Image (cartoon, rainbow, N blue to C red):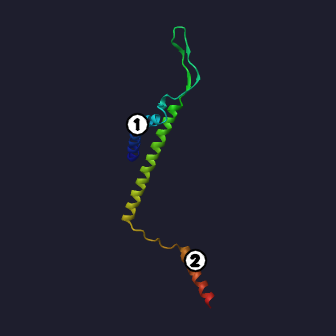
């Protein structure tokens, strides 16, 4: 139970670190490469904002903020990739530890295998006669 709680806390902290790295380091670099685009500002205006006579916005615009979605999807892909690598590393380390602790000993044959071996040997003896 404690292991799971520690994993959740570390996972949350790791998610924040990756989100910061994506939003502060990776996405600005990608935006620069594709022409200076800030991905969080990308949106599609479905209905424009209504402006009153005093110049203030009375009704907010209806937009689809696909830039935020792209950034969140990129965050997810990076987090998933690093979790995959981490699990792969842990699996590899535990397999090596198991191999050093207990060398692989072939399991004893089951009763069915012993019986089939005896039948095979008897058939070979009858075929040679």
Mark 1 or 2, nearer chain start:
1
Residue 27 image position (x, y, % from top left): 45, 36
Q: Which mark is residue 25?
A: 1
Please tell me which residue is depicted at 46% across the width and 71% down the height of the picture.
Answer: 106
Circle 1 or circle 2, nearest the eye: 1
Q: Quadrant of residue 120?
A: bottom right
Please tell me which residue is depicted at 46% across the width and 49% down the height of the picture.
Answer: 84
Q: Nearer the viewer, residue 52 or 102?
A: 52
* Residue, disc 2: 116
Q: Quadrant of residue 103?
A: bottom left
Q: Nearer the viewer, residue 26 or 96?
A: 26
Q: What is the C-alpha distance between the residues marked 1 and 2?
A: 65 Å
The secondary element bearing badge 2 is classed as helix
Relative horizontal placement of residue 35, taking residue 9 as reference (left or right): right
Relative horizontal placement of residue 9, taking residue 34 as reference (left or right): left
Q: Which residue occupies the extreme bottom position in the image?
A: 129
Q: Quadrant of the C terminus?
A: bottom right
Residue 80 image position (x, y, % from top left): 47, 45
Residue 10 image position (x, y, % from top left): 38, 42
């Amino acid at each position: 139970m404690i292991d799971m709680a520690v994993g959740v806390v570390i996972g949350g902290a790791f998610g924040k670190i990756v989100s910061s790295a994506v939003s502060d380091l990776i996405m600005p670099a990608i935006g620069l490469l594709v022409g200076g685009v800030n991905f969080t500002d990308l949106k599609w205006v479905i209905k424009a904002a209504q402006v009153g006579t005093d110049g203030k916005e009375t009704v907010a615009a209806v937009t689809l903020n696909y830039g935020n979605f792209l950034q969140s999807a990129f965050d997810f892909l990076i987090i998933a990739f690093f979790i995959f690598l981490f699990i792969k590393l842990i699996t590899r380390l535990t397999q090596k530890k198991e191999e050093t602790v207990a060398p692989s000993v072939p399991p004893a044959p089951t009763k069915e295998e012993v019986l089939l071996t005896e039948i095979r040997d008897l058939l070979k003896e009858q075929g040679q006669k």
